Image (cartoon, rainbow, N blue to C red):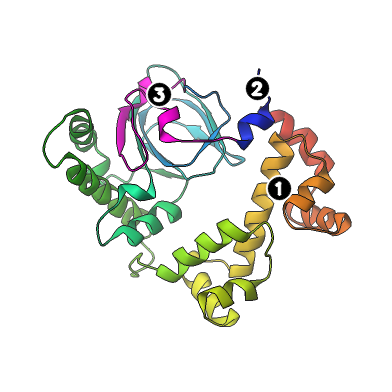
Amino acid sequence: MKSSADKYKKMHPLESLGITPATRGDIRVERLHDRIMPKVPFPHKHDFYQIVIVYSSKGVHEIDFHKYKVTGQQVFVIKPGQVHTWTMPKNSKGFVIEYTNESFSSKTKNELIHISRTVPDHTKIPKELASLKPVFLEFMEKEFLGENPLKTSILEHYLSILLLELYRGTHRDTGRTPTEDLVTQFSDLVETHYREEHHLKFYADKLKVSPKALSGKIQKVLGRPAKEIILQRCLLEAKRLLSYSPLSISEIGYELGFDDPNYFSRFLKTYLQVNAVTFRKNKGQGAH
């Protein structure tokens, strides 16, 4: 039997889940009631985006240590690498849409990837979002299950409409377009280097901008300073490792680029508000 640590390490691909086979680059659309019990036991993480649209259900959906009460008329967006688990009954109604960065071939690819990364993990379905109504998802499902000409392009356009409407429905306070190449590039760099590079200057140099300019741009779009984005990414991985891996606290620190165990312990206590041992005991046990 695999340990929770083994499950944590594995990034499951599209091929590992779902009822209908799909591979990287595909867009899969399935009914929620068929996906309540996943092929890969919870908690797990995958290397693709998963949009879960819930029309009626009850239970709890936990995404990276945030627990959401499932009540229906909700959208959950699970990003690659996020650890999640849910409990919902078999008669739940809704849809599951899965895709990867390679699913987009159009000139708006960067925009749609940016949206996929920045829409909230959870939101209530706004009444005006036509793309989240059952009839729209039924069209998507029919296209996915069929073998019609231009199937791939049509599914991509359906998904684009859904993402654009979801972004618009959750970002009413801004008139900016979501096309933010610098933010996308910064996010990619953080995801690649957060384990060994915690200094803002490294990322600014890579992007050929000053640290001040980079921080201002990130603050404007994401609402948080760039330095905080880097540290929060380290913290999230630390929480995952504390909860799902057998590594010692000092080993986790080394894994995340903290050479001084005492400094790493202080870093954790500052952000967790409890020491690492207490977090592992309380949250770690509750996460399995």
N-terminal of the pair, mark 2 or mark 1, is 2
N-terminal of the pair, mark 1 or mark 3, is 3
Above-or-below relation of 79 to 9: below
Q: Residue at image x 68%, y 25%? A: 3
The local secondary structure at tag 2 comes to: loop
Q: Which residues are magenta?
A: 10-38
| Residue contact at pointers 2 and 1, CB within 8 angstroms | no
Q: Nearer the viewer, mark 3 or mark 2?
A: 2
Query: Which label number is shown at residue 2?
Result: 2
- Camera-nearest residue between 223 and 19: 19
Q: Position of residue 26 (x, y in %)?
A: 31, 39
| Residue contact at pointers 3 and 2, CB within 8 angstroms | no
Q: Quadrant of the N terminus?
A: top right
Amino acid of disc 2 = Lys
Asked if residue 188 shows in the view, the reply is yes
Q: Residues within 10 Å of mark 2 (few under 14, many from 20)?
A: few
Amino acid of disc 3 = Arg
Above-or-below relation of 277 to 196: above
Q: Is residue 75 in the magenta section?
A: no
Which residue is labeled 3 in the image?
35
Q: Is residue 24 in the magenta section?
A: yes
In the image: residue 173, left or right of residue 138:
right
Which residue is labeled 1 in the image?
238
Above-or-below relation of 153 to 58: below
Total tally of numbered discs in the picture: 3
Q: Residues within 10 Å of mark 3 (few under 14, many from 20)?
A: some
Amino acid of disc 1 = Ala
- Camera-nearest residue between 211 and 161: 211
